Amino acid sequence: DAGVTQSPTHLIKTRGQHVTLRCSPISGHKSVSWYQQVLGQGPQFIFQYYEKEERGRGNFPDRFSARQFPNYSSELNVNALLLGDSALYLCASSDTGTRGEQYFGPGTRLTVT
Amino acid sequence: GENVEQHPSTLSVQEGDSAVIKCTYSDSASNYFPWYKQELGKGPQLIIDIRSNVGEKKDQRIAVTLNKTAKHFSLHITETQPEDSAVYFCAATKESGANSKLTFGKGITLSVRP
């Protein structure tokens, strides 16, 4: 069975641009969470979606937004990119969204220049 | 909110020795504690977890212990091998809430010397 998939693998953007990152959860999983991992740090929670509804939001500015589609895949959008947005963006899949087990994808490495 | 701290930040052991990584958490309502292994260029991989209704869980060479009173939990790796070298993260969350966002520690780099 396929695990969590994310696209693209790497991305280079310029300050002020916007970016869309994509995630497909494990088959049968209905919840997707997004995390930001800055080099040398642990992942930091951005959003969780379950059944297309936002279930949680971390301490990130409104420039960050996300949505979940009927097939449970998800997009993370970041507007007005800053240098500090450079990070590994991780998507995690879970079955119900309330149980703790989350399975991560390989991430998207975003570099903002 | 929850705060998870991880000590030490780096650990080097000889192949075959045991490694112990410790984490503390602040929110007594947290009840689920996973451990993740992250290799270079990859996403975190769930290797073992524990819920607050048990004190210890073991899976082959890996074990996790939980002390709810002291609010700390530890990862134990026995008979370490070079392929155990990676960054290990502990995390905590409260299940049965509206969501299950994980709060992570900063990670520890484990090096296993051949």
Image (spheres, coloured by chain):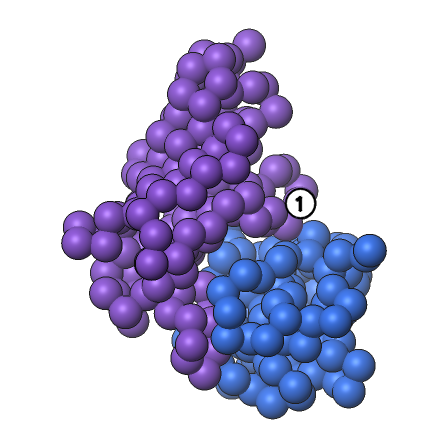
Say what secondary structure mark 1 lies in: loop
Q: Which x, y percent locates residue A52?
A: 66, 88
Q: Position of residue B21 (x, y in %)?
A: 36, 35
Identified by mark 1, the residue type is Lys
Which quarter of the rendering shows the N terminus of chain B? Answer: bottom left
Q: Colour of chain A?
A: blue
What crowding class fits label 1: few (fewer than 14 Cα within 10 Å), some (14-19), or many (20 or more)?
Answer: some
Query: Which quadrant holds residue A25?
Result: bottom right
Q: Is residue B42 above or below residue B91?
A: above
> Which residue is most to the front?
B54
Residue toward you, A76 or B12: B12
What chain letter is assigned to the residue under label 1?
B
Residue A89 appears in view: no
Asked if residue A1 can be seen in this view, the reply is yes
Q: Residue at x 50, y 20 (%)?
A: B80
Residue at screen point 47% across, 50% down? B49
Of residues B5 and A111, the one nearer the viewer is B5
The image shows residue B77 at horizontal and vertical percentages of: 45, 28
- Residue A21, x across and y down, in percent: 72, 70
Look at the image and tell me in which quarter the C terminus of chain B lies: top right
Q: Which residue is mark 1?
A: B42
- Left-right relation of A112 to A2: left
Q: Give the camera-side residue of A108 and A1.
A: A1
Chain letter for the purple part: B
Seen as rendered, the residue at the extreme right is: A1
